[in-house]
Amino acid sequence: MRPQDILMPVPAGLCCRPGGFHIDPVRAVDRAVITHGHSDHARPGHGAVLATQETLDMMRLRYGDHFARSTQVVSYGETIRLDGVTVTFHPAGHVLGSAQIAVTHGGIRIVASGDYKDVRDPTCTPFEVVPCDVFITEATFGLPVFRHGDAAVEVKKLLASVALFPERAHLVGAYSLGKAQRVIALIREAGYDAPIYLHGAMEKITHYYQSRGIALGELRPVKGMKKADLAGTISLAPPSATSDLWTRRFPDPVTAFASGWMRVRARARQRGVELPLVISDHADWDGLTRTITATGAGEIWVTHGQEDALVHWCTAQGLIARPLALVGYGDEDGEDEPASAHGEAGA
């Protein structure tokens, strides 16, 4: 049996024909195994959805209770069998509840990473290296120029700006699921204990994080606040809100954006970002290559992102590598490239 007999790309996404399921399908299927709650990976309308509790909860928050005909919770480390194929979920470190999917059949183990990062995040279970024969990796930041650095240092830049401009509001653009909560947690770890303000679109998912035991301190809605009272404060909003009329409620706002794409200063200028913060929920170049090596996989399949450079690197290491060219990912709140390439997703 060959790996491509177990998992193969089809128009709906990554299909396991022997197991009768798809991983993160982009269109409705009978049985979907979902890696995490970002909407480019977790879509409504499937027959059955198998995912972690947190991912299922996030899908309910976004799509309502009837987003699928049936659901099944799979915990980290739990092994299930689907039509003779063994499936195990492992932490991906991307957002709360995110999972890598290990698929074993005919003596071959394939791990589909979904989106992942291998650096510390106080809001989710750390990434776990899973030894395998074939590793399917994302490549959102699959170029050597992308080295994210320490997110805590970026947060210190934000807090230094808050101290320097007490008369101005600081408005941080951050994706609503995962990035916003991580930024808040890092701000708290840096010693900032004043209330943090939220755009209405972020309230539901952020309160869900708190309900799962993630400590985020005192949070307040921006709605209803007087403009003058927002001086010296930090507010978080979806990236789209930082460039529209909504910002007029803030006194002389300093616009920040937390994203791996802020490593490219031209992107910050294009967006009118005054304070770029290089904080990503995806592995950077070093994280990608480090993880590939750690899995011990002899074959690497690269998907949604900068595929060619990572395939070239793998080949130079003596690995078998190929791009999967899956489509339909990166068009919302993951962290893929802004609209010029893959859409606006959760960098």
Image (spheres, rainbow, N blue to C red):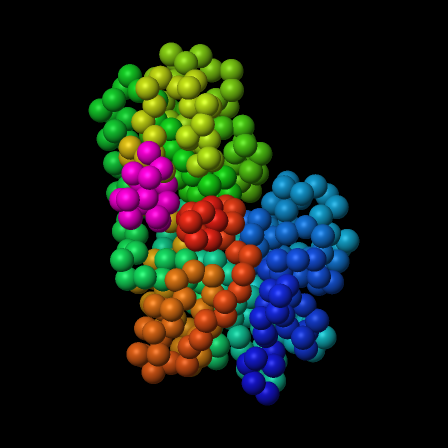
Q: Is residue 326 left or right of residue 311?
A: right
Split into 4 quadrants, where in the image is the N terminus?
Answer: bottom right
From the top left corner, tell me how far across and down residue 322 is, in percent.
44, 75
Range drawn in magenta: 258-272
Extreme residue in the right direction: 69
Query: Does residue 271 show up magenta in the picture?
Result: yes
Q: How many marks?
A: 0
Q: Is residue 39 left or right of residue 184?
A: right
Instruction: Classify 213 as above or below 329.
Output: above
Asked whether the viewer can see residue 271, the reply is yes
Instruction: Classify 232 as above or below 139.
Output: above
The answer to which quarter of the image holds residue 253 is top left
The answer to which quarter of the image holds residue 252 is top left
Asked whether the viewer can see residue 78, the reply is no
Q: Is residue 162 left or right of residue 219?
A: left
Q: Main secondary structure of the magenta part?
A: helix
- The residue lying toward the viewer, choosing from 54 and 272, is 272
Residue shown at 51% from the left, 43% from the top: 177
- The residue lying toward the viewer, choosing from 283 and 54, is 283
Instruction: Classify 299 as above or below 199.
Output: below
Residue shown at 52% from the left, 46% from the top: 332
Query: Does residue 167 show up magenta in the picture?
Result: no
Extreme residue in the front direction: 340
From the top left corner, tell me how far across and down residue 223 is, in percent.
51, 20
Residue shown at 60% from the left, 60% from the top: 24
Residue shown at 70% from the left, 57% from the top: 28
From the top left corner, tell me how far across and down residue 32 is, in percent.
67, 61
From the top left corner, tell me how far across and down residue 340 is, in percent.
42, 49
